[in-house]
């Protein structure tokens, strides 16, 4: 029971991080102020892994330029960041933050969680887009996670 509660808290932290990054895009609040606001008003500790939430928001803010470049360099020909829906951007930023900053979280979990979040907002091709883009970035950032899986499956 405790493990499922912990997993739920981590899922909630991811969704909250996406919401905080989305709000921050329009409010121009600092990472510290958005974190404080969400922890005080929207993130009861019994429902949210507050540590994960804070790490994702802080890293997405600290590395926003780099993460944005990662997104842009992995877009299909003819696509630009400006074409990406404003709700997709924080989903991608939080997903990249987790890929980069949470090495113990398996890539399959990260992809699944952010695709699930995308499905909460979109009903068409956007969840597949999130999956594809985060998968490409994960293969660049954590290639060892993919080579280990190949060896394990072939043994």
Image: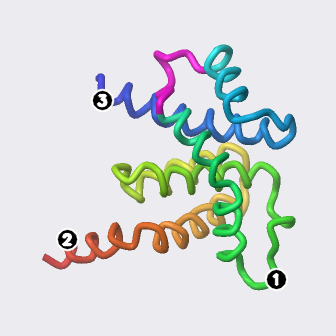
Q: Is residue 64 left or right of residue 56?
A: right
Residue drawn at (66%, 50%) of the image: 91
Q: Quadrant of the C terminus?
A: bottom left
- Sequence-earlier tag: 2 or 3: 3
Name the residue at the left extreme: 155
Q: Quadrant of the N terminus?
A: top left
Circle 1 residue: 78
Circle 2 residue: 152
x%, y% of residue 147? Answer: 30, 76
- Sequence-earlier tag: 2 or 1: 1
Camera-nearest residue between 32 and 71: 32
Residue drawn at (63%, 54%) of the image: 63
Other-residue count near label 2 (Cα within 10 Å), few / some / many at <14 / 14–19 / ≥20: few
Callout count: 3
Q: Is residue 73 left or right of residue 109?
A: right
Circle 3 residue: 3
Task: Tell me, yes or no, whether the two marked residues, 1 and 3, touch with CB atoms within 8 Å.
Answer: no
Instruction: Please report the bounds of the magenta region as a residue range.
Output: 43-51
Residue drawn at (70%, 62%) of the image: 68
Q: From what the image shows, is residue 4 above or below residue 149?
A: above
Main secondary structure found in the magenta portion: loop
């Amino acid at each position: 029971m405790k493990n499922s509660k912990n997993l739920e808290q981590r899922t909630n932290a991811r969704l909250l991080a996406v919401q905080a990054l989305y709000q921050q895009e329009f409010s121009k609040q600092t990472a510290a102020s958005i974190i404080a606001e969400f922890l005080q008003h929207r993130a009861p500790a019994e429902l949210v892994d507050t540590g994960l939430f804070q790490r994702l928001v802080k890293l997405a803010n600290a590395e926003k330029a780099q993460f944005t470049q990662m997104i842009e360099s992995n877009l299909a020909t003819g696509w630009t960041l400006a074409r990406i829906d404003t709700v997709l951007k924080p989903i991608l930023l939080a997903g990249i933050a987790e890929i980069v900053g949470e090495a113990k979280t398996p890539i399959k979990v990260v992809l699944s969680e952010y695709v699930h979040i995308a499905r909460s907002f979109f009903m068409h091709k956007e969840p597949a887009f999130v999956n594809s883009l985060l998968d490409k970035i994960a293969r660049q950032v954590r290639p060892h996670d993919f080579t280990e899986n190949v060896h394990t499956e072939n043994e």
